[in-house]
Image (tube, grey):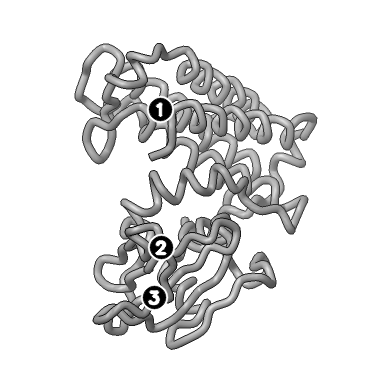
Amino acid sequence: MSSNPVVMERLRVSERRLAGLVDGLDEEALGTASACSAWSVGRVMAHLGSGAEIALAGLHAGLVGSTESVPAEVTQALWAKYDALGESEATARSLQANAALVDAFEALSPSELADVRVPFFMGPVPVTSFASFRLAEHVVHTWDVEVTRHPDVELDPVSAGIILDMVLTPLVGRLARPPRWPAKRVLVRLSDSDAAMTLVLGDPVTIEDDMPDGGESDGREPGRPSDAIAIMTTGAFIRLAYGRLDRTRTPESVGVSGSVSLDELREIFPGF
């Protein structure tokens, strides 16, 4: 599990990175398309801003010992508030909200970091887990903004590793659409970390550690053969799972061989 300092540090890095990307952009520039479906850059900022305010409310609830998630009416009111703002206004408010959330995480005492449980959709979770989910959202949407200007940009590898461990591995089934064909196993080798895991394409889709004892594995253990092998960086694997590894944004280093194709993997992870 990633440590509190590393998660909080990457949140601050991502917050500052996004602030730098949108600094000086006018209403027209903020209205241009991002890499996130039909959202403009400004709407991505609005989404991150409302998400930051909702997350801050959730954190405050955890700090006072509440086990109740942020009420739906509060969430809906924040969405409506951002929806009513223009691109520039939404961006300005979003930047303030994102900074305030990271400030709140950084202000937590060691005992709060260890003991507080934050109400979340999956039940009360430790602060580090809660912050990791926020990191995933912020890092991926920051990429949505940045890639439109810098086509070769990749997710920060440290953040990508946290997202893989804390978010994607336990909850990959929420991002995946079960395949139309019988279950298959894809050995995924991460070229930037020498790690390996098995992506089980069943119903639900899951991720299994391919090297439980820390040793080398070729994905051919007795009774557990791989149907395909995928080689890519951790950042590219996160983007695949989040529906952001389309043909125009796939590095040449990505390779998939065997009875599952990269296009079939893209179909399983449609994104949002």
In terms of depth relative to the viewer, which is nearer, 196 or 41?
A: 196
Q: Whole-Å distance between the Cαs marked 1 and 2?
A: 38 Å
Q: Dot 2 lies on which element?
A: loop
**Gap between marks 3 and 1 measured at Cα:** 39 Å
In what quadrant of the picture does the N terminus appear?
top left
Going from N to C along the chain, the mark reached first, 1 or 2, is 1
**119 left or right of 97 in image:** left
Q: Which residue is mark 1?
A: 55
Residue under label 2: 215
| Left/right of residue 183 with respect to residue 270 in the rendered view | left
The local crowd at label 1, few if under 14, some if 14 to 19, many if 20 or more residues have their Cα within 10 Å, is many
Q: Which residue is more in the foreground, 235 or 151? A: 235
Judge left or right: residue 24 versus residue 205: right
Amino acid type of the residue that numbered disc 1 sits on in the rendered structure: Ala
- Residues tagged 2 and 3 counted as in contact (Cβ below 8 A): no
Residue 190 position, x and y percent, is 53, 62
Label 1: which secondary element:
helix
Camera-nearest label, 3 or 1: 3
Name above or below for residue 242 compared with residue 227: above
Mark in the foreground, 2 or 3: 2
State which quadrant residue 66 falls in. Answer: top left
Residue type at the position of mark 3: Gly
Look at mark 3 in the image and give the residue it sits on. Answer: 219
Residue count near mark 3 (Cα–Cα under 10 Å), binned few <14, some 14–19, many ≥20? many
Residue 267, compared with residue 82, is above or below; it is below
Task: Tell me, yes or no, if residue 253 can be seen here.
Answer: yes
Residue type at mark 2? Gly
| Residue visible at 45% across and 24% down in the picture | 53
Camera sees residue 37: no
Residue at position x 48%, y 57% in the image: 242
Q: Position of residue 55 (x, y in %)?
A: 40, 27
Provide residue 154's location: percent of width, then percent of height: 66, 53
